[in-house]
Image (tube, rainbow, N blue to C red):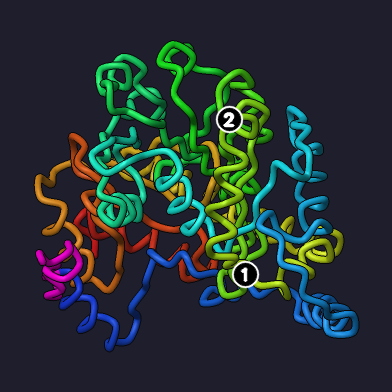
Amino acid sequence: MGAGCFATLDLTPNRIELARQQAAALPGYLDLTSSNPTHQGLLFPPDILRGAADAYWATRRYHPDPHGLPVARAAIAHTYAARTPSLLLPEEAIFLTASTSEAYGLLFALLADPGDNLLAPNVTYPLFDYLAEIHHIELRPYRLDESRGWQIDEDDLRRQVDHRSRAVLIISPHNPTGAVLRGPLPVLNAVGLPLIGDEVFAPFPYRVPSVPPIAALHPDLPVFQLHGISKMFALPDLKLGWVALNGPAHQTYGERLELLNDTFLGASGLIQAMLPTLFAQGMTFVDAMRDRIRANLDDATERFSACPSLTLKPPDGGYYLFPRVHGWDNEEDLVLFLLDRGVLVHPGYFYGEVPGTHIMLSALTEPARFAAGVERICAALDGEY
């Protein structure tokens, strides 16, 4: 029997990781890559969590449902109805999972057989590469146009489609560029493939007033919308995500997805029961987190605009920045140069291969440390540090 891809994966630390370990032990080290809110002082109010948990324990009963608890699905459906534009979904079109990563795995299994392909943006979160390997499917990258704020290149997407293409992955707001799909794309209607829409950063619009639901933009295509509590409520440890199907997706795939989700039943009954309380009482916390992220993005956008060594396309939403750096041909050398000056960023190649030299930094970072890190990057690139 041949070894799987993970059995032979080279886990030797690369030069960046080795340098990071050394830099992290020194005073003044600044990590601008964190996506973990619990490490950045963003802690969901514990009294709300305790109250919601106490209510669950007082009435605890286990009624396994491959869709998830009805009260949780009702709360999720209400949030979609409140989006702009409004998206009306029946509760039976929502499936609760342990995470959006698990939801992706279910959809890959649902839509594609080994050897099939899914279209995914280049650049994007590297999670997809591992999930595609697990399911023995091909990821075909389609181009994002940096000159247009990292919007989808429709001609290139069309060129990637062949007879084994099964779906298009869309992240809005995009990770790590922050681009938002603002309106329907003619190419998506033309190719007619199901859409897997990742909207985990939708609660954090920046240059747009709101993030439209992908299913509302393409109501005639099967659309699977992914979301969860990890980003929205800064609760990555409580593990709850969901898939919401629009009408065409539910009609064609709903029963099959029900069977797949019933195979695992991965979502905790406790956190499902707590979800309505999170929505009812937690939005003040979400608003405060959004304000903090926006302030960080404002500060970085202003500072980078005065940094001649760097060009930033400000994000439409989310909390990542993906600027282009001038005067450097090797992203790894650039990251090591910045690490020598005590600041960690990610190289652009962590997210895919695109022309130019890019770095990624997270505006989720605690504000004082974020401002210091942004200043240090500019000073280093301008030869002043």
User: Could you say which disc has been placed on residue 252 in the image?
Assistant: 2
Q: Is residue 9 magenta?
A: yes
Q: Which of the two discs, 2 and 1, sits closer to the camera?
A: 2
Dot 2: within a 10 Å radius of its alpha carbon, few (fewer than 14), some, or many (20 or more) residues?
A: few
The residue beneath circle 1 is 235
Spot occupied by residue 64 in the image (x, y as percentages of width and height): 71, 67
> Can I make out residue 146 in this image?
no
- Report if the CB atoms under discs 2 and 1 are less than 8 Å apart: no
Query: At 16% from the left edge and 52% from the top edge, which residue is drawn?
Result: 331
User: Could you say which disc has been placed on residue 103 in the image?
Assistant: none
* Quadrant in which the C terminus appears: bottom left
Span of residues in magenta: 1-15
SS under mark 1: loop
* Quadrant in which the N terminus appears: bottom left
Q: Main secondary structure of the magenta part?
A: loop
SS under mark 2: helix
> Can I make out residue 106 in this image?
yes
Query: At 60% from the left edge and 65% from the top edge, which residue is drawn?
Result: 265
- Choose between 30 and 263: the one closer to the eye: 263
Q: Is 11 positioned to the left or the right of 184 in the image? A: left
Spot occupied by residue 350 in the image (x, y as percentages of width and height): 25, 54
The answer to whether 185 is drawn above or below residue 33 in the figure is: above
